[in-house]
Image (cartoon, helix red, strand yellow):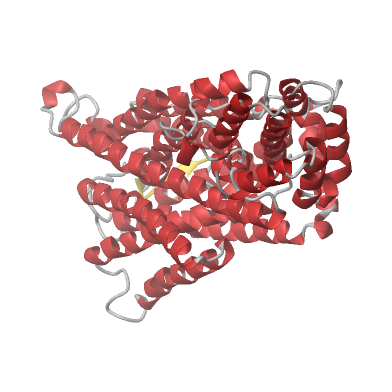
Amino acid sequence: MKGREFELQERLDGGESGSDMLQSEAISISNAQTAEYADSVHASEAPSAATSRRNLISNDSNTGMRRSLILQFKALMDLASVRENDSNAQCIAGDEEVSSMKSPTKNAPNGPPRHVDINSMFPEAKHPPLSREELNAFYIYSLATEPVVVVIFTALSTVILQNLAAGAGKEVSDHAIPCNYTVAGYQCVTEIAGAWIDPSSFSLYTTAFSVLLQAIVFISLGALADHGSFRKKFMTGFMVCALISCMCMIAIRDSSLFLFASAIVILAQLTFGASYCFYNSYIPVLSAVHWDVLASAADDSSRAQVHEATMNTLSAVSQIYGYCGAVGCFAVAGGCIFALQALPAASGFGDGGFFDSMAVTTYAMQIGVFVTAVWAAVGMYWPVRYIRERPYAALPKGTNYLVYSWVKLSKSFRRARRMPNTFVMLFAWFLLSDAMTTVGSTTILFATNELGFSTTEILILAIGAPLTAGGGSYLWLRLQRKYNISTKKMLIFLISLSVMLPVYGIIGFFAPFGLRAKWELFPAGIYYGVLLGGIQSFSRVLYGELVPRGHEGEFFSLYAITDKGSSWFGPLIVG
């Protein structure tokens, strides 16, 4: 036995009592919590170690102590009680329990603790240690749902909305002539509430309006997730609503229903974003009970470093899972699209078929949206089963659910001077995320309208971003670990690199190069993807470090307003 456990054993062998040792350890871990913890230690001297353990863990949400500290004290109490009994058999058993508890990856024969073992060891715990099944379920959530962002919101929905609006539009030169948007370089407008707008602008306006609604809904729900078991219910419930909305796209069989299609996309983006708001808030929560954090040294600075590294790992690995899922789902959805386009007219899908009035390409893309939603629905099984609710204190009786989050948020803004870095990071993320998302969505429209990309070329371009983003997430994480670079410095470095892409596009206004040819978009897409994965991963980790504990839902609801394919300022300007 090495490190922390060896030091504790030497102190116990030297005659120091378990309660005295625990009390001194509390001082070294968190001076601000010494008095509170000392009371817990003295009150627990009479009962057995098991009873003390249950009391401490069951009072987690009420004492306000950090979950990682409670679990650290649990291991210390087990070790102290076993050693004080001066029984060799009990000593060996206690050592094994603490070893497996504090460093399961090194001592347990099967790696990290299993879900069933955690349930048996901590039957009454609200925030038990992280199990490998729960961690894998956290990653699978990203594997299943990230394709919705990449395939539907970024690639397909923008083109579908544009084509549907164009199919219901008229020629610019003569509003009596129906628009033929199957011709390259078509010039059409669509009438909406008496105003004539460009079909490509219609899809951008849809996204902008969606984000404005998200701002209201996210803020209204954010603080509620910090109480009771709302976090998991909101995360899974909203995702189900988003997937059902996406599946409804398959019911649109006429271009005249373009406004209905727009409403479906808005609802899907709204509920999907709400789900990811609560998914992101799990990162600091799960990191606090990760086995690496529990096995770290007890002083605050060491634990903080391990906690930051663990958050980076969870964030980056979940991004890698998500982008790998996006690539796989893109291959499946793209195969379906190509297969439908190749069918004969008698099937209803080919040239001159039943759906030819809205062009076979458009409806084939709607089938791709449906396939992506089914992919995500299947993958949701594991998060629903294994991710724990990890509740905080229940809401006070008589709480008005509609205004509670707004009241909490107003109090947080009044305390902004006490946490300026949090709000500066939040404002910076609004601008950064909006810009990155706008670049992705407008690139698809630019490639279609200005460079005349075919459906095949669009899919190749779109699939390149998640493929390289997954590799980028892994690359930047390895680089950070190798050179021990802080999260903040990594983020600044990647943002600096990302500025070069729009600068290169601006050069195209004055030179014969600069995103003026088809081939230029493919390396630009790779460059964009490599940076995107790292920027998203490091951004939410840095923000998660600044969020006050117990307020993850409240603050991540603000973070999610422009996260995961949602932006409003950029599309509004471009539109």
Rendered position, 436 above or below 277: below
How many marks the image carries: the answer is 0
Say left or right for 282 vs 42. left
Rendered position, 496 above or below 534: below
Say left or right for 208 vs 35. left
Residue 317 or residue 446, whichever sits in front: 317
Name the residue at 35% across, 63% down.
527
Residue 484 locus on image (x, y percent): 51, 65
Say left or right for 408 vs 357. right
Q: Is residue 257 visible?
A: yes
The quadrant of the rendering that contains the N terminus is: top right
Residue 392 locus on image (x, y percent): 73, 30
Residue 160 occupies which quadrant of the picture?
A: top left
Name the residue at 30% across, 57% down.
447
Name the residue at 25% across, 34% down.
332
Residue 378 locus on image (x, y percent): 38, 23
Q: Can residue 158 be seen in this view?
A: no
Residue 475 locus on image (x, y percent): 38, 59
Which residue, as the protein is rendered here, is positioned at the far bottom? 510
Residue 129 occupies which quadrant of the picture?
A: top right
Say left or right for 154 vs 51. left
